[in-house]
Amino acid sequence: MKDLFVAVLGAPEGVVLFQLIVATQYTIYLSLIAFIGGGIVAAGITILRIIPNKPARFLAQSYIWFFQSAPLLMLLFLFGLGVPRLLGFEVNIWIAASLALTLYSSAYLAEVWRGAIQSLPDGQWEGAEALGLRFFQTLKLVILPQALRVSLAPTVGFMVQIIKGTSLAYIIGFSDLMSIGKRWANAPVEGTEPFIIYPLMALIYFALCFPLSRLAIRLEKKLGTVAKTPPVAA
Amino acid sequence: MDLRFFEIYRRSDYLWTLLEGALFSIGLTICAAIIGFAFALALSGVRFAQVPYIRNVATCYVEFIRNTPLIVQLFFVAFGLPLLLGYQWPFWAHALLALVLNFSAYFSEILRAGYGTVSTGQREAAAALGMGNLLIFFKIILPQAIAKMYPSLASQFIFLFLTTGVISEIGVNDLTQAGKFIDSRTFRTFEVFFTLTVLYIGISLTFKIILAGLQQRLFAWQVAR
């Protein structure tokens, strides 16, 4: 595979492109871990946020508030560098990066899903109660099928933010597209100047993110969205 | 496990470093937001007016910025462009340019959504009164769009502020860089970055309060209705 790249593009360009594409898989793995992990945590937080129990709701609300307000970069520093030094042991870089990104995405997803659930009219809950359904039955049979529709678009849209967010993981030493690309940009090799490498990396990130962005817009048009979707950047 | 926050707080020079970093971060973000907003007006304006070709360029630009990480844009602006075009700027200028480019794309997308909320009837009424296209845009559509989208713009601004920590990666002395400096002296990594997290959250809350107050002042005509 590498030989093919070198044969078509020549050295060093072929080698660089091959390495960037190989490194991209780690960006994708980390994104998927953050998305799935964040989704699982967010599901728990969302339920805590809506059950009729004040302390649980307060706890979930505080969680969402804190991890939405804390910059992702700080979470990475805290879990990648701070916690290991505080506790005095080495933390695997995958675990640290996954943890920070999972916390980051769980807060956002929980907020979106809560918004989706609470956007449904109270009549849905009341009707289900009148039919004799219990809380979790109502949630499973009545609320979630409707809430999932409207939350699909912002959820897919948020995957873009996760992919872009993983680019910060190189700061704590995670080896992904960003880290490999930066190494090449700093290397004194002709053909790997920063003005070549960074646009190339941007194109790879764009190729990952743009289809998801389009998909999110299409889903939004087709299924609708949550009225108050929190802003995103990075 | 022992938390030793006092190792940071007892040193007045560390506290000064943090204060300077925080002020720098705040100042640079506000500058970037103002210039970026002006850019965003132009970007969303040409898309709204459907200026041929330029509109497509603006769309590509906005989509490209929104679908690539800020850190890659920052490194390109800070290390790629100067090498390509042969200029030398101080670090903060590179950071400012990168943030302006980044912010403008996000703001322009919000503004564009705002233009869509102004009903075509208003445009038609203004045209019937003999107003030109530019006048309609600046007098009728833009004020309403901004008033309507102000909450979105404000929360996007705060969100973007939280991402500005990455500019420390090119050696700008912002709040994150101040933290890194203190960390390198004290090795109290957790305490330093916890402090920084609290500072970032505190500043964004302050922004939130100020921006909400500004909304009452600026758009009293809208709130009153």
Image (cartoon, coloured by chain):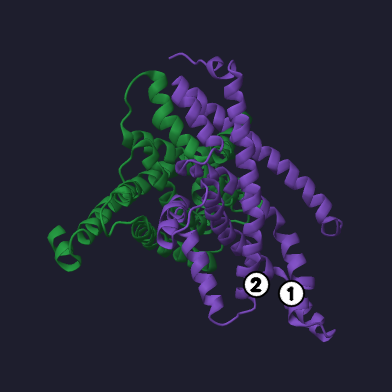
Chain colours: A green, B purple
Can the viewer see residue A225? no
Helix, strand or loop at mark 1: helix
Q: Which amino acid does label 1 sit on?
A: Phe
Q: Are marks 1 and 2 in contact (CB under 8 Å)?
A: yes
Subunit of mark 1? B
From the image, tell me which residue sits under label 2. B45
Q: Which of marks 1 and 2 is nearer the N terminus?
A: 2
Image location of residue B150, percent across then percent down: 71, 56
* Image quarter hosting the N terminus of chain A: bottom left
State the CA–CA distance, disc 1 to disc 2: 9 Å
Which x, y percent locates residue B62?
Answer: 52, 65
Note whether residue A63 is visible: yes
Q: What element carries label 2?
A: helix
Q: Residues within 10 Å of mark 2 (few under 14, many from 20)?
A: many
- Disc 2 marks which amino acid? Gly
Viewer-proximal residue among A102 and B150: B150
List the residue tagged with mark 1.
B137
A8 to A18, vertically: above or below: below
* Tag 1 and tag 2 share a subunit: yes
Per the rendering, the mark at residue B60 is none
